[in-house]
Amino acid sequence: MKWLIIFIICSSLFAKDVIRFSPLPMESASKTLEIFKPFIEYLEKKSGKKVKLVYRATNLEIIKGLKNKEIDLAHFGPLPYVILTKEYKDIVPIAQFLEKNGKNSYTCTLFKRKDTKIDLHKIQNKKFALTHKYSTCGYVFVEDMLKKYDSSLTNNEFKYLGSHYTAIADVVTGDYDIGGVKTSIYDQFKYLDVEAIGIGEENPSLMLVANTATLSKEEIIQFQTIITSATKKDKKDWDVKINSAAKIPDIQALLQYQKRVENIEIEDEK
């Protein structure tokens, strides 16, 4: 019994030193680990704690993991954050990753092929290429844009293609009439005879959030400091997808975004 008690105490102490980190699902599990490995090693070096990558294939699975207290730190976008905070209050954004242009925000672009004529006013029976269900540039952005023209996705067909690049490609090939993607990605491919027909409002950039139900205040402050103080030299081995500067989150901008999108009901593809 004595040894059992010692074992339980030691196991609990060890578990406390393991930080469970779940990143934005960009690729397969193995590719995601490859992308984030230098980032995780940096966190371990600076914190003195073991950081374990907890892979989740979708934003919704990350949300569930945080609510079930299976994840301590998560890297995702503003829309999953808004969805999560509707039901789970033990979460706090601790760092915001800047875009390549140095801004802490981004926009989404609605586009079509140049050789097609489309009037968004009360548009019906068109095919929309969307990214992810819980991506800001997916249903939420497109529906918000269409409402300005007395239109809605409910009067059209739409599909979640899982990638901004696929959405662009499928509009170019004519499989879909209209697409919605991140503006910076649209700008990379606008030479492919596509044309912007609407640009949305500024959205908060990707962030790192902490689970206050599983991490102490001291641990949260520690990881916030580690992330926001990392230099270019520190990040030299980080993947290009995550090596941008990180700042203290703009909470006011996040609240404004939340007010804008929280009443939009995201529907399944049709």
Image: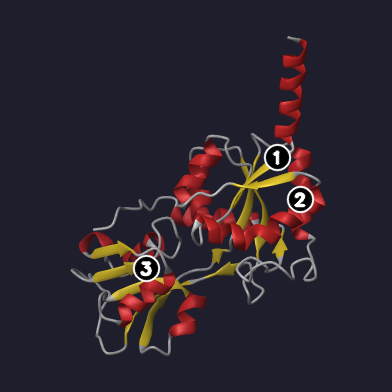
Amino acid type, mark 2: Glu
**Dot 2, crowdedness within 10 Å: few (<14), some or many (≥20)?**
some
Residue 110 makes an appearance in the image: yes
- Name the mark on residue 18: 1
Choose mark 1 or mark 3, whichever is in front.
1
Disc 1 to disc 3, C-alpha distance? 43 Å
Instruction: Please report the residue visible at 58 percent of the width from the left and 63 percent of the height from the top.
Output: 205
Q: What is the spatial separation of the Cα atoms under label 1 and label 2, in whole angstroms?
A: 10 Å
* Residue drawn 29% across the image and 69% down it: 128
Residue at coordinates 43% horizontally, 65% vertically from top-left? 137
Picture coordinates of residue 256, whole percent (x, y): 54, 57
- Per the rendering, the mark at residue 44 is 2
Q: Earlier in the sequence, mark 1 or mark 3?
A: 1
Q: Earlier in the sequence, mark 3 or mark 2?
A: 2
Residue 261 is marked as none
Label 3 to label 2: alpha-carbon separation: 43 Å
Amino acid, disc 3: Met
Q: Position of residue 141 (x, y in %)?
A: 41, 64
Characterize the local packing of mark 1: few (<14), some (14-19) or many (20 or more) Cα atoms within 10 angstroms. some
Left or right: residue 28 compared with residue 159: right
Residue at mark 3: 145
Residue 246: image location, x then y, percent: 70, 63
Quadrant where the N terminus sits is: top right
- Dot 1 lies on which element? strand
- 115 in relation to 122, above or below: below
